Structure formats: structure tokens, C-alpha cells
Image (cartoon, grey):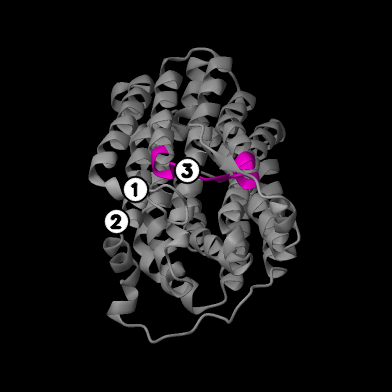
Amino acid sequence: MSAPIQSPTGSSAALREHRSFVFYWCARTSTNAAYQMQAVAVGWQIYELTGSAFDLGLVGLVQFFPVVVLGIVVGQIADRYDRRVVVGTCQAIKAFAVLAFALGTLGGWLTRDAMLAILFVSGTARAFETPTMHTLVPGIVPPKLLPRAIAASATATQTAIICGPALGGLLYVFGAGTVYLTCTGVFVLASVLVSLIRLQGPPPEKKPVTIETLFAGFGYIRRNPVVLGAISLDLFAMLLGGVTALLPIYAKDILATGPWGLGLLRSAPAIGALAISIVLARNQLERRVGHILFASVGAFGVAAVVFAFSTSLTLSMVALAIYGAADAVSVVIRHSLVQTRTPNDMLGRVMAVNFMFTGTSGSLGEFRAGAVAALFGAFTSVLVGGIGAILVALLWMRLFPEIVRIDTIQGRQT
């Protein structure tokens, strides 16, 4: 996965000089950390309530539906209204949803069905928030810094995934209600940070809504093989190779740890991802970007296979760290390819469609993992998924040779 990279002097400092990017980075870190803390508490609480792998899969499924159903609307909202207001409103809704988790836990009325209903509300807010959050970056930094800003944004996500689950597992010692109340405060903080962001350029033009504008994002992606290939590669790799939903089973039944072990397992992919994202934020991949993309997806699948066979907490964490590092390389390259090849006035709709597929691949992948684990066991589910991700990388190299030939993010081909 190594490749020639270049580090222009002062690139990291240049990003830090953009105060709005600092606010953005902090907001993204805090909201993702709270979401990860919430996920640890929800996963452990549901598994304690029901002991069902299928119910763990349902956690992903109820968050999958809003993204699919509302994807077209999300793109229109992001391209027509102030994107900061959209993101801030979503933070407030997530704060109310997690507060409901806290009240239900402390009041003793929180059932599986109630938890799934609250997750649906929170998932709906995330359906609007996530793609809109991504569209903020091109309006904060100049184009020449965009690839590094995307990589730095990935460090925000990975920092949150490291700290969030570990903190969530630690706070769970004091009860799930403590985790949920903490998340409420963090979501409110994220909303305040987003309000401090200042965007460059004119506000979005509110064009009339027509059938053509509603589906413009789909049409643009269909006409661009590189964008289509990048989005679909993530969709199928994550659909098959996701292991997150089964971590409570591995932590409790295979590795014999408690909530603290689950927190460590959820943090492990982000440790590897954060390390590689920091490198990519300071250094830009200069050659053979297409080859690196497919190599990273293949490594992602291999790491999942190793995790499937592991019965050691240490080996499992190492495998998951490699798993996360490989996924981070793929994420940075794919998002850079999509955003550098999409006009700003189309970015909301394209990113909404992108999230409709790539964002739901994780949730739908969790449901797949849980359903297969319920029928054949957790080991089989993870093993088959890892092998499937490897096969997807090989097949997509044949289906999308335009991506294989990409030499640089800016578009030079080999």
C-alpha cells in the first residue's frame, strides 16, 4: 500500500490557518465521538436485553431506511439551503434522541422496540447531516488544499472512533444513562461549533425543483465512470466486509471480555485509520492512486478474514487496526475523486446519492452480518464477508479500468 508521496512545506499549517476548518474539524470529531459512544451503549444494552444477533443486525437496518428513503430530499436541501443550518439542526435532533435513551434507561421503560424507534429518529437526522457535512469542506478551504482537508477530516472521524467507543465503554461502568447524558451534551456542543463556521463564496442558488433536478445526482454519477466505480466499490465492499455489528458477540462470547473489551475492539479499526489518515493529511499520494485504491480494499478483506479466525484480543485488535487503516486509504481516495470531479452546485445531490449507497452500506452490512451470524454463526459471517470484499476488489478492477488507470487525484492517467 506504499506509494510515492509529497509533503509541500506548510500544508498542515495552511489548514490550521483556516479557522472555519478548525471549527469544522472539532464539530465533526465531537459529533462522531458521541455517535460512537451511543453505539457502544446501544449495542451492549440490546444484546443484554435480547441476546440476539439478529437484533444487533436490526440496529443497522433501522438506520438504513431513512438514508435510502430520504436520499433525494437530502440532496435538494443541501444544495438549496445554508448547509451549516442543516447540520446544526441535525445535531439538535440527535441530542433529543439520545436524551430519550437516557430518560428511558433511567426510568426503566426502554425496551428493544423503543430503542429501535429512537434509533430511527437519530438515523433520519444522520441521513441529512452526514452528506451535508461533507459538502461544507469545499466551501471552507481553497481547491489546492481539498485532498489534504478531506484526509484531515478523516482524522476527525477516526479520532472520534478511537476515543468514542473507549470512553463509551468506560462510562458504561456507571450505567448506560451516563453514556447517553454525556452524548446529549456533546451533540449540543457540535451544533454550536457548526454555527461558528464561515463559508467562502455565494450561498446556494435556490433553483426550481423539477424531476430533472431531483434526480440530477443519479444522472451525474451514471455519466461518470470514475465516480460510479468509486461509490459502488465502497457499497459492495462494506456490505460484505463489515464486522462492527458482531463485535458484541466477539467481545462477550469469543474473547470473553466485558463492555471495556467491546470499546477496545470498536476503537481498534480507528487506531489504524487515524495513523494512516494523519500521514495522508500531511502528504499527498502522487502516483498510482487507482492501484492503491484497489489494494486497500483487498487488504480490508484480508484483515477481516484474519479477525474471523482470531481468538486472542491482541490479534483481533491488530487485525482490526489493519482493517481500519485499509478502509481509511480507500475513503480518502474515493471522497477526493468524487469531490474533485463534481461541481459545487451539484455537490449536495451527488454526495447525498453517495451517502445513500456508501453510508447505507455500513448499516445494511451490519444487518447482513447479523442475519448470517444468526443462521450460521459469527465466524462464518465474518469469514465469508472478508472473502467477498477481496473478490469485489478484483471484479471492480475489471469493470472500471478507468479507475485503475488513475495516476493522481487531480486526474492524470497512466
260 in the magenta segment: no
N-terminal of the pair, mark 3 or mark 2, is 2
Q: Residue furthest bottom?
A: 208
Q: Secondary structure at mark 1?
A: helix
**Vertical position of residue 257 compared to residue 7: above or below:** above
Please give the label number shown on residue 371: none
> Which residue is label 3 attached to?
287
The three-letter code of the residue at mark 3 reads: Arg
Q: Quadrant of residue 274?
A: top right
x%, y% of residue 244?
47, 34
Q: Position of residue 84 (x, y in %)?
A: 61, 70
What is the C-alpha distance between the residues marked 1 and 3? 13 Å
Q: Position of residue 4 (x, y in %)?
A: 53, 38
Mark 2 Cα within 10 Å, few/some/many (few <14, many 20+)?
some
Which residue is label 2 attached to? 225
**Residue 157 visible at all:** yes
Residue with the mark numbered 1: 403
Per the model, the C-alpha gap separating discs 1 and 2 is 8 Å
Label 3, label 2: how far apart the Cα atoms are = 20 Å
Is 47 or 259 nearer to us in this picture? 259
* Residue type (three-letter) at the residue carrying disc 1: Ile
**Magenta residues, start to end:** 277-291
